[in-house]
Image (spheres, rainbow, N blue to C red):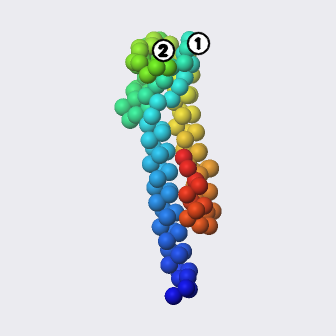
């Protein structure tokens, strides 16, 4: 009865590994869809990045690229989380769009390039439990 069934232990570790990947993937998605910061006109604002906001970024980029507008009012949040409207110039939008893109890419890199390799290299459930978002 004291024998360890290595096949069963290996299976259990793989199941725990899959659960950890799913957990981290969900946290990555949640973080991507959350707010990110960007400095506009010397002031830090926070911007939504949910699915609707991402569509708005693409529409605004297209409008600026086609020369249809030189500025747009944009919903942002101040440091206290209060909604505010900020007028975004084309130059401000380039900064904002890059911050939006980097917010997405940095979180994907954290998941894919940093945490996922640690999950795959984990030898025990205790190792997996140390890996946190």
To which residue does mark 1 refer? 42
Q: Which residue is more in the foreground, 68 or 105?
A: 105
Within 10 Å of disc 2 (Cα), the crowding (few <14, some 14-19, many 20+) is some
The percent position of residue 15, horizontal first and vertical second, equals 47, 67
**Of callouts 2 and 1, which one flags the residue occurring earlier in the amino acid sequence?**
1
**The quadrant where residue 72 appears:** top left
Compared with 14, 35 (above or below) is above
To which residue does mark 2 refer? 88
Compared with 21, 110 (above or below) is above
Residue 89 horizontal side relative to residue 83, left or right: right
- Measure how far apart labels 2 and 1 are at the Cα level: 13 Å
Residue lying at 53% horizontally and 25% vertically, measured from the top left: 37
Q: Please, what secondary structure does the residue beneath circle 2 have?
A: strand
Q: Please, what secondary structure does the residue beneath circle 1 have?
A: loop
Q: Which residue is more in the foreground, 97 or 114?
A: 114
Q: Nearer the viewer, mark 2 or mark 1?
A: 1
Q: Which residue is more in the foreground, 82 or 63?
A: 82
Residue 52 horizontal side relative to residue 2, left or right: left
The percent position of residue 102, horizontal first and vertical second, equals 57, 34
Compared with 45, 100 (above or below) is below
- Residue 79 badge: none
Residue lying at 54% horizontally and 46% vertically, measured from the top left: 133
Q: Is residue 55 visible?
A: no
Q: Is residue 12 visible?
A: yes
The percent position of residue 131, horizontal first and vertical second, equals 58, 53
Are the residues at dot 2 and dot 1 in contact (C-beta closer than 8 Å)? no
């Amino acid at each position: 009865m004291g024998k360890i069934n290595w096949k069963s232990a290996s299976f259990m570790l793989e199941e725990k590994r899959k659960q950890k990947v799913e957990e981290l993937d969900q946290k990555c998605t949640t973080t991507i869809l959350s707010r990110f910061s960007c400095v506009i006109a010397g002031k830090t604002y926070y911007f939504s990045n949910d699915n609707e906001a991402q569509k708005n970024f693409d529409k605004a980029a297209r409008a600026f690229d086609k020369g249809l507008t030189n500025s747009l009012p944009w919903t942002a949040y101040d440091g206290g989380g209060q909604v505010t409207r900020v007028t975004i110039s084309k130059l401000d939008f380039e900064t904002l769009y890059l911050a939006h893109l980097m917010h997405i890419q940095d979180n994907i890199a954290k998941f894919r390039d940093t945490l996922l390799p640690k999950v795959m290299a984990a030898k025990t459930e205790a190792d997996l439990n140390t890996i946190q978002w």
